[in-house]
Amino acid sequence: MNLMEIIEIRDKLKAELAIVEKFFEIAKTHGANGSTTETKEPAPRDTADQGRLKLSGENTYGNIADSVREAIRMAPDKYTVRNLFTILESINKPLTKVQISTVLARLTKRGEVEVHKNGKGNKPTTYKKTNISTEKRLSGGEPGEG
């Protein structure tokens, strides 16, 4: 390999690196989910919108949460992820236990669901119904919507 070939390879690599750097800047600016952010840290979200993933005008998280809320209404006063999993399968709206757990964690943060007893090891976390999870969600609306 002569010096001219090495210089040519170097120049080609520089050009390709410049393209990669541009894509990297675009990814940093727009984030992985397409939302515009100027920093690496995600922008703080309003708690009412926390966990709301919107793709192509569709509220995916909301649809899953609505199914879990429906199962909570059908569940006994104290229930586990396994109980909700069984209920959702019986009403032909199957979700994974991970999806159900994620929704329950978010609903707990919002105060819609209350933890009765934290799980440990092979003992699952037990949740209990609240007025919010059984009454205010029957209409399917979000708090503050009117």
Image (tube, rainbow, N blue to C red):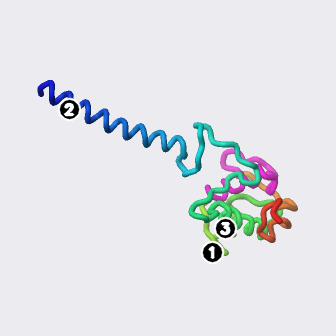
Please name the residue that numbered disc 3 is placed on: 86
Cα separation, mark 2 vs mark 1, equals 62 Å
Q: Find the residue positioned furthest to the right.
A: 131
**Left/right of residue 76 with respect to residue 11 in the rendered view:** right
The one of 112 and 2 positioned closer to us in this rendering:
2
Q: Secondary structure at mark 3?
A: helix
Q: Quadrant of the C terminus?
A: bottom right
Label 2 Cα neighbours within 10 Å, binned few <14 / some 14-19 / many ≥20: few
Residue range highlighted in magenta: 98-124
Residue 47 left/right relative to 13: right
Residue depicted at 61% across the width and 64% down the height: 57
Q: Mark 2 and mark 3: span between their CA atoms? A: 64 Å
What amino acid type is highlighted by mark number 3? Thr
Kindly report the distance in space between the C-alpha atoms of the residues bearing marks 1 and 3. Answer: 10 Å
Left or right, 123 with reference to 78: left
Identified at 58% across, 60% down, the residue is 55
Mark earlier in primary sequence (1, 3): 3
Residue 77 position, x and y percent, is: 83, 63
Task: Tell me, yes or no, whether the highlighted magenta stretch contains residue 111.
Answer: yes
Instruction: Count all numbered tags in the image, as a single digit.
Output: 3
Q: Is residue 82 above or below residue 105?
A: below
**Picture layout, residue 58 above or below residue 29:** below
Residue under numbered circle 2: 8
The location of residue 121, given as percent across then percent down, is 67, 45
Q: Which residue is mark 1?
A: 92
